[in-house]
Image (cartoon, rainbow, N blue to C red):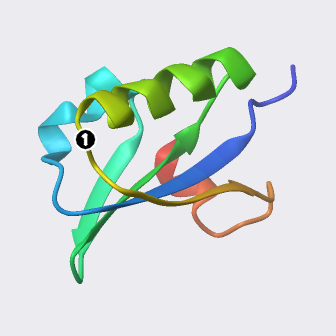
């Protein structure tokens, strides 16, 4: 079975790591004024759902990246 793609989403400000469940189990890491969400996202509609949640929180989206499977981050989020 193929793994879902791994994404990295970066926003301005601090989001509490306790919100991980609300963001489909993505890891939330804060540093240098930005929160980075990293984790697998099942499909485009799930990605849109996460982006909508971020928009509802009124945070500034800085970047969205689909990471390569061989990225060093992948084992940390599985």
Q: Residues within 10 Å of mark 1 (few under 14, many from 20)?
A: few
User: Helix or strand or loop: what does disc 1 sit on?
Assistant: loop
- In this picture, residue 13 sits left or right of residue 49: left
Estimate the x, y position of residue 56 in percent, counting from the top left.
29, 28
**According to the image, label 1 marks what residue?**
58
Screen quadrant of the N terminus: top right
The residue at the point 79 percent across, 54 percent down is: 69
Q: Residue at x 20, y 63 (%)?
A: 13
Q: Can you give x and y, in whole percent of width and height, for residue 8 in the image? A: 56, 55
Residue positioned 25% across, 41% down in the render: 58
Judging depth in this view, the residue of 6 and 12 nearest the camera is: 12
x, y percentage for residue 4? 74, 30
Q: Is residue 43 visible?
A: no
Residue 42 vertical placement versus 59 (above, below): above
Judging depth in this view, the residue of 51 and 5 nearest the camera is 51
In the depicted structure, whether residue 24 falls above or below residue 76: above
**Residue in front for this viewpoint, 43 or 72:** 43
């Amino acid at each position: 079975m193929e793994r879902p793609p791994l994404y990295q989403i970066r926003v301005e400000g601090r989001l509490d790591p306790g919100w991980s469940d609300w963001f489909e189990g993505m890891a939330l890491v804060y540093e240098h004024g930005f929160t980075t969400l990293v984790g697998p996202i099942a499909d485009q509609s799930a990605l849109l759902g996460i982006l909508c949640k971020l928009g509802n929180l009124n945070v500034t989206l800085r970047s969205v990246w689909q990471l390569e499977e061989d990225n060093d981050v992948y084992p940390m989020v599985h």
